Image: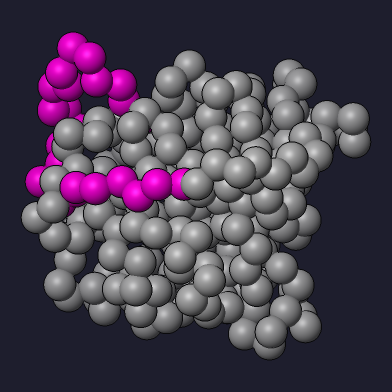
């Protein structure tokens, strides 16, 4: 992807408001009201997801197939916008796309095709950024659902960042440990502080891993510490949600599946 395709920082004075309402009783097949939009979430592996809704496709963190992502298919699919959390190869591989998507890669507040997208600067590692520098957590609303994708993050969330984030409806958070992702216990603490309605865990060890070059733990290690949450196995790499499905009945964790036979 060429430099001319980058969307440069364009701060706005808009204030991001908080969304309200969610809970554990959501179903992929639940009918939506005639006036309600929806959000489709497709897991491409690791921290890479494609979000489709409101006539917009947003792809987060395309990776190079190496190490913990070696066995996943290519995430280089058609999209309108690419968001990356860092320039590391497992979350910021931006060459080889089939069309000409725009790219956001720095903290700031942006407008893209009528959608406000906020990149929140966070410290990527437990060494105050000395090892991996900064991480960009991405916050936006799509299909009526307030989404926070935390990227690959092991550093703490401070007061200022929590104020910027507010309460997300949907939180995508790394849980597999290693030097640039929360351990299961760290992830549980961050989830408690942000109080999301639905959590999708990311950045954990799967069958895609080169076992000699992946320092993550499986998602089950995270699920074991989330004793107060309702666990839902999606049994698919794709999930469609509507805002009315997200009630306030408690925390739900949605575990996506990846078809390694396709």
Q: Position of residue 189 (x, y in %)?
A: 35, 79
Q: Is residue 17 magenta?
A: yes
The residue sitting at 34% across, 38% down in the picture is 145
Q: Name the residue furthest right.
A: 3
The residue sitting at 53% across, 29% down in the picture is 115
155 on left or right of 34: right
Which image quarter: residue 180?
Answer: bottom right
Q: Is residue 152 or residue 223 the one in the foreground?
A: 152
Inspect this view and state whether residue 65 appears.
Answer: no
Quarter of the image that includes the N terminus: top right
Which residues are drawn in magenta?
Answer: 16-39
119 on left or right of 50: right
Q: Where is residue 10 in the image (x, y as percent from the top left)?
A: 74, 40
Q: Position of residue 155 (x, y in %)?
A: 58, 78
Q: Name the residue furthest top.
A: 34
Q: Is residue 63 or residue 32 the one in the foreground?
A: 32
Q: Position of residue 52 (x, y in %)?
A: 46, 26
Rendered position, 79 above or below 86: above
Q: Name the residue furthest bottom.
A: 127
Rendered position, 131 above or below 232: below
Q: Is residue 173 magenta?
A: no
119 on left or right of 34: right
The secondary structure that dominates the magenta segment is: loop
The residue sitting at 60% across, 58% down in the picture is 120
The residue sitting at 69% across, 84% down in the picture is 128
62 on left or right of 52: right
Rendered position, 101 above or below 132: above
């Amino acid at each position: 992807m060429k430099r001319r395709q980058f969307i440069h920082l364009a701060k706005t004075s808009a204030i991001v408001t908080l969304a309200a309402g969610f809970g554990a009783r959501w179903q992929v097949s639940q009918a939506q009201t005639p006036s309600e939009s929806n959000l489709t979430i497709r897991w491409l592996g690791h921290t890479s997801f494609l979000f489709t809704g409101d006539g917009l496709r947003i792809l987060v963190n395309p990776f190079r197939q190496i190490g913990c992502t070696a066995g996943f298919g290519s995430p280089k699919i058609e999209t309108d916008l690419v968001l990356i959390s860092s320039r590391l190869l497992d979350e910021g591989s931006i060459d080889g796309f089939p069309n000409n998507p725009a790219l956001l890669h720095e903290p700031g507040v942006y407008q893209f095709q009528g959608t406000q997208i906020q990149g929140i600067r966070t410290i990527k590692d437990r060494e105050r950024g000395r090892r991996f520098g900064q991480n960009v957590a991405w916050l936006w609303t799509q299909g009526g659902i307030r989404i926070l994708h935390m990227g690959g993050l092991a550093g703490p969330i401070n007061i200022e960042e929590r104020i910027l984030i507010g309460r997300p409806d949907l939180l995508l958070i790394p849980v597999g440990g290693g030097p640039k992702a929360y351990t299961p216990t760290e992830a549980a603490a961050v989830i408690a502080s942000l109080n999301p309605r639905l959590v999708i865990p990311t950045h954990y060890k799967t069958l895609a891993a080169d076992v000699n070059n992946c320092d993550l733990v499986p998602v089950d290690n995270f699920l074991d510490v989330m004793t107060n949450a309702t666990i839902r196995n999606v049994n698919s790499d794709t999930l469609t949600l509507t805002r009315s499905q997200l009630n306030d009945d408690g925390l739900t964790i949605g575990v996506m599946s990846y078809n390694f036979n396709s």
